[in-house]
Amino acid sequence: MTGARAAMQERVAELDAAHAQAVAGGGEKYVARHHARGRLLPRERIELLLDEGSAFLELSPLAGWGSDFAVGASVVTGIGVVEGVQCLITAHDPTVRGGASNPWTLRKIFRANQIAAENDLPLISLVESAGADLPTQKEIFIPGGRLFRDLTRASARRQPTIAVVFGSSTAGGAYVPGLSDHTVMVKGAAQVFLAGPPLVKMATGEDADEEALGGAEMHARVSGLADHLAEDEHDAIRIARRIVARLGREHCAAPEPATSTEYAEPEVDPETLLDVVPVDLREPFDPREVVRRVVDGPGPGNEVAFDEFKALYGTSLVTGWARLHGHPIGILANAQGVLFSEEAQKATQFIQLANSSRTPLLFLHNTTGFMVGERYEQGGIIKHGSAMINAVANSTVPHLSVLVGASYGAGNYGMNGRAFDPRFLFSWPSAKSAVMGPAQLAGVLSIVARAGAEARGQDYDEAADAAMRAMVEQQIEEQSLPFVLSGMVYDDGVIDPRDTRTVLGICLSVIALAPDPDAGSFGVFRM
């Protein structure tokens, strides 16, 4: 076993443990209580909803990691196939504080809704939520209105929205079934009201019965909020599948699984990805070795696995064309980390070519940023880097990003980081992202502090400086780790490197079925 493999396996084991926390929900006690009531868990509901044997791409599973809230943020989101149609699915987890929404829940759902909108996916909400987490209402109330906006805009775009209510759907949560195109409620279990009996008592003095106030039968027979009254959870899921089957969404129907004759498997076994990328980001690696293990191998209509573009120019950025599960893609992958003027110019031209041929782009990050120094400033690094960022920002073909190693500074922007709205962005457990590396950032602060002391005519405290640098390095190191960033929903999930090809294949199948955006124009390139 190589040192790189052993180190990466440790990171993957940490990832598995973090994912297990998300799957555990509120813990054994609350899971057992939920099951004792005859209720299914969110992932059990999703499994029954999906077509048998189809994949589910879970999104943002580590949302809330490192916060005061449960890992996963009390909701499960992801993309799956229902009655042959690719759908965006959201399922509240009632074992975590009754499924109440906290600030990370909102960020996770907003990101899921954005993915659904960009890829024109039907939205299915599996609802059982106590509404807002009241102690954090100041962080939820104002931005929370976006959830209502997203649902109504989806409906206006003819992007179907379906709500299946299994339990309580209170306060703001009541508007999810209220704003959805189709609403299913489970008899004897679903309860939808703007205010539960305690609040009604406080507001009006009325002693209200829960069933009369918001029960499923009342909404089916009296208020008309429920379009379908289900006998139980399994019946509700059957009804939801029936609704999807009637949508007539041929353009987002999941493609038939490609046969082995339609594309070749990678030249090198993806299992060996664990051997390629060192977890010590100071150690260089050849990104072509990552590409060879992710893209299709040579075959009919695909003479070479990776058709490299400008291989001898700007060599710290590798660019070229490939196919992945039969889908054509353009790839930009950092080689030695630093982006020079040549790399920026090369990227700019390549992005323009991809837009001309309407080819999606895949960005594989391992960059410390754009090069600095007198020689490079005089050589135009700012204007060349700006041209690359301009090209990325105004490119209209779908973008995918994977943070493989480092993603620091403006290099993160040039390589299509989260701020530039890639369709999907995932991280490997080896990835790190920050304004700059920990040692560099601590060193800059030290230089500034030293210069300030000299300007004041004071002696510089070397011991305090060493302590400050150590503290800052540790802080930045911790803040740049992938679990922290994923917990803040700055990616769509941390993935096992060996799953990269499968994850990207699912993403490309989703992208391929969405309407192709019109070719746009770029801003002014400073020459």
Image (cartoon, helix red, strand yellow):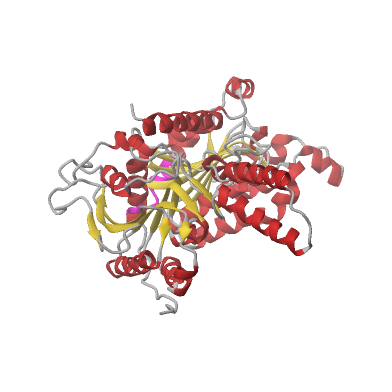
* Magenta-tinted stretch: 241-255
Residue 54 visible in rendering: no
- Identified at 33% across, 26% down, the residue is 1
Residue 334 in the image: above or below residue 405: below
Give the camera-side residue of 520 and 55: 520
- Residue 480 among those drawn in magenta: no
Q: Quadrant of residue 356?
A: bottom left
Give the camera-side residue of 502 and 195: 502
Residue 58 in the image: above or below residue 95: below
Residue 77, position as x, y percentages in the image: 51, 42
Q: Quadrant of residue 516?
A: bottom left
Residue 25, position as x, y percentages in the image: 58, 30
Count the numbered circles shown. Answer: 0
Residue 239 visible in rendering: yes
Residue 291, position as x, y percentages in the image: 29, 47
- Identified at 84% across, 40% down, the residue is 201
Give the camera-side residue of 244 and 500: 500
